[in-house]
């Protein structure tokens, strides 16, 4: 059955089609200039991902470190190609991730417009995604999340095109995108299963035989990647220890992890979609005004109870006298590890800095306000999205099928992260939530029905909706953009100094096993040494033998300051230093 695109004039005039991508590219160019991604050093876990790419480029074959939990093969393949062309270097890999991030935002725009989202809503959703601090910071790394989400978004866009234009050939191409995404992160399986179910169950106007055929094509096209990956895994000796440990830790799964991760995920998805739910406040008012009274009261009240319970859960379980960035949970946002911190963006992976009080200023009152605002947003977002989903039951056609796919994908990824984000490994990581937030963003933006806001004279209506709340969403996007740029700039700045100090020390002939240069520095220089010893599992040592030299953000007792380098922090508005310390001989 051929379904027409639910809006008119999108492709006429043609010249306007390319204006949004050009604007998105311009935004990324400005971001790159401001942040400055230059520097030959790894960030966070991407040291191990880059090792796989560099070894492949050097002709050593596909090798995945024991440390790595993602499947990674797909990222190593294109990273190896880049390294083969440009030579091994972190900057080319970082720029490739930025390119994929830009392409993802562009595909989000086209996907939302294909699904019938208004121009205003589509732009707010795209800007919310670009300015999401966690997504933004990861775009300047070689971490797996951004490449994974690019192939997921490409798959979603192609599925929308396939179903809106009844082009079954594109179903296979879409499935192949999800199959390749599985070669980067195994959570793509949840999108693949959601696709099979939506193709089978949510297109009642199509004959069952046709639906089965489409689902079979989808399963074969995506499953071939999964089969090839697992055959390769068996040949090389099985899954990595990091993957096996996640399975072993399931025996410790308990209510504390389930509740904590569930509330954390709800709050973070709401935070990531903040500009969108601000824009949809008039829809909430329209629901309360027009819905049956019992629904108008009970549904927002239920979400208020969930939000309040989540707020109290973290306050009662994780209140502590001082803020410790390395702690798995906190009493207020940022609740979780691994990108967003009260100190900015990116983990301060310096030992002992990481395990102590933060070396930079923190702003608990600001983050308490963010937490309360996010709790309010959860009530708004939960209410309007539930209303949209209930209304979705009465619709048919490709749009209903796609929105159902997005809903199933978001729920599936959320459930997976709640169960497999073990407290013994630090709990739920904020960056892992992006895989659930992306389909949730598409769903929340595309499911909106024009005219949801009330239009009664003298009440909150179209004029207010198109004015006050658009302005509020714009101000929120601006605030997130400033924080994302400033905090990512700071993250690159202090890492650049850390590596300059560390490489200078090694140039003097100092054994890297006697240097604690931080997680990435010691992993890059010492991982193979510990691997040869069979001692890679003790990651809490961060791979050093002797703490003669420390690279930190503050002086330490029993250590002398040998040198220091400074950078100006855009977030904190002051000069901060990175120190090289040597054990005192006095």
Image (cartoon, grey):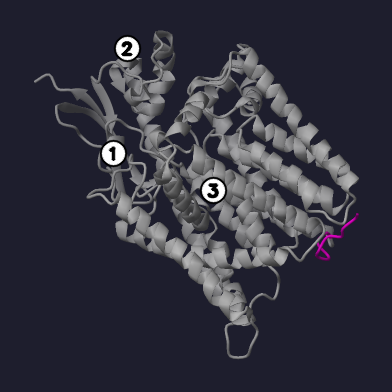
Q: Residue at x 65, y 47 (%)?
A: 409
Residue lying farthest to the top in this orientation: 532
Q: Which residue is mark 2?
A: 509
**Magenta-tinted stretch:** 1-11
Residue lying farthest to the bottom in this orientation: 457
* Quadrant in the picture for the C terminus: top left
Q: Could you classify mark 2 by the number of other residues whose Cα lies within 10 Å: few (under 14), some (14-19), or many (20 or more)?
A: few
**Left or right of residue 418, residue 452 in this image:** right
- Looking at this view, is 421 or 336 the one in front? 421
Q: Quadrant of residue 59?
A: top right
**Left or right of residue 552, residue 152 in this image:** right
Tag 3's secondary structure? helix
Q: Which residue is mark 1?
A: 577
Q: Could you classify mark 3 by the number of other residues whose Cα lies within 10 Å: few (under 14), some (14-19), or many (20 or more)?
A: many
Q: CA distance from mark 2 to mark 1?
A: 24 Å
Q: Which mark is residue 31?
A: 3
**Left or right of residue 574, residue 42 in this image:** right
Tell me if I can see residue 229 in this picture: yes
Question: As displayed, is residue 408 above or below residue 248?
Answer: below
Give percent across and percent down for residue 348: 35, 37
Query: Counting residues from the N terminus, which is met first, the one under dot 2 or under dot 3?
Result: 3
Q: Contact, CB < 8 Å: mark 2 with mark 3?
A: no
């Amino acid at each position: 059955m051929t379904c027409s695109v639910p809006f008119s004039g999108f492709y006429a005039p043609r010249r306007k089609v390319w204006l949004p991508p050009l604007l998105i590219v311009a935004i990324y160019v400005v971001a790159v200039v401001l942040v400055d991604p230059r520097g030959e050093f790894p960030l966070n876990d991407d040291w191990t991902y880059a090792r796989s790419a560099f070894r492949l480029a050097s002709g050593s074959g596909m090798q995945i470190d024991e440390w790595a939990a993602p499947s990674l093969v797909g990222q190593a393949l294109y990273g190896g190609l880049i390294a083969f062309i440009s030579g091994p270097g972190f900057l080319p890999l970082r720029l490739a991730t930025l390119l994929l991030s830009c392409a993802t935002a562009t595909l989000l725009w086209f996907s939302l417009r294909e699904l019938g989202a208004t121009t205003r809503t589509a732009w707010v959703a795209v800007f919310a995604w670009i300015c999401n601090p966690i997504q933004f910071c990861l775009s300047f790394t070689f971490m797996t999340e951004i490449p994974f989400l690019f192939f997921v978004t490409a798959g979603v866009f192609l599925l929308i095109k396939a179903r809106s234009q009844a082009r079954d050939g594109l179903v296979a191409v879409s499935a192949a995108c999800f199959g390749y995404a599985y070669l980067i992160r195994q959570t793509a399986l949840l999108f693949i299963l959601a696709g099979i179910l939506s193709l089978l169950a949510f297109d009642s106007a199509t004959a069952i035989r046709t639906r089965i055929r489409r689902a079979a094509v989808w399963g074969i096209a995506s499953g071939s990647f999964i089969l090839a990956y697992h055959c390769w895994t068996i040949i090389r000796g099985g899954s990595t220890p990091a993957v096996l440990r996640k399975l072993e830790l399931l025996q410790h799964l308990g209510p504390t992890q389930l509740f904590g991760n569930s509330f954390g995920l709800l709050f973070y998805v709401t935070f990531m979609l903040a500009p969108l739910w601000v824009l949809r406040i008039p829809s909430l008012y329209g629901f309360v005004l027009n819905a049956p009274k019992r629904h108008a009261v009970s549904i927002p009240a239920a979400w208020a109870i969930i939000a309040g319970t989540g707020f109290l859960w973290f306050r009662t379980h994780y209140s502590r006298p001082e803020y410790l960035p390395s702690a798995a949970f906190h009493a207020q946002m940022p609740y979780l590890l691994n990108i967003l911190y009260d100190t900015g963006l990116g983990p301060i992976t310096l030992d002992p800095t990481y395990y102590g009080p933060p070396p930079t200023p923190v702003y608990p009152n600001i983050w308490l306000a963010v937490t309360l605002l996010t709790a309010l947003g959860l009530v708004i977002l939960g209410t309007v999205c539930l209303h949209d989903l209930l209304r979705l039951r009465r619709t048919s056609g490709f749009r209903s099928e796609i929105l159902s796919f997005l809903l199933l994908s978001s729920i599936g990824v959320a459930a997976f992260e709640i169960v497999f984000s073990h407290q013994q490994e630090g709990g739920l990581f904020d960056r892992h939530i992006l895989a659930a937030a992306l389909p949730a963003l598409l769903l929340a933006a595309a499911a909106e029905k024009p005219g949801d806001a009330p239009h009664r004279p003298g009440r909150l209506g179209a004029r207010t909706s198109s004015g006050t709340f658009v302005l509020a969403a714009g101000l929120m996007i601006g605030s997130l953009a400033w924080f994302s740029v400033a905090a990512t700039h700071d993250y690159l700045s202090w890492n650049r100094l850390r590596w300059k100090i560390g490489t200078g020390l090694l140039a003097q002939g100092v054994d890297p096993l006697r240097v604690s240069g931080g997680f990435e520095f010691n992993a890059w220089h010492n991982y193979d040494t510990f691997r040869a010893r069979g001692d890679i599992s003790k990651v809490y040592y961060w791979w050093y033998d002797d703490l003669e030299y420390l690279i930190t953000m503050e002086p330490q007792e029993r250590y002398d300051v040998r040198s220091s380098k400074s950078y100006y922090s855009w977030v904190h508005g002051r000069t901060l230093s990175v120190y090289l310390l040597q054990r005192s001989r006095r």
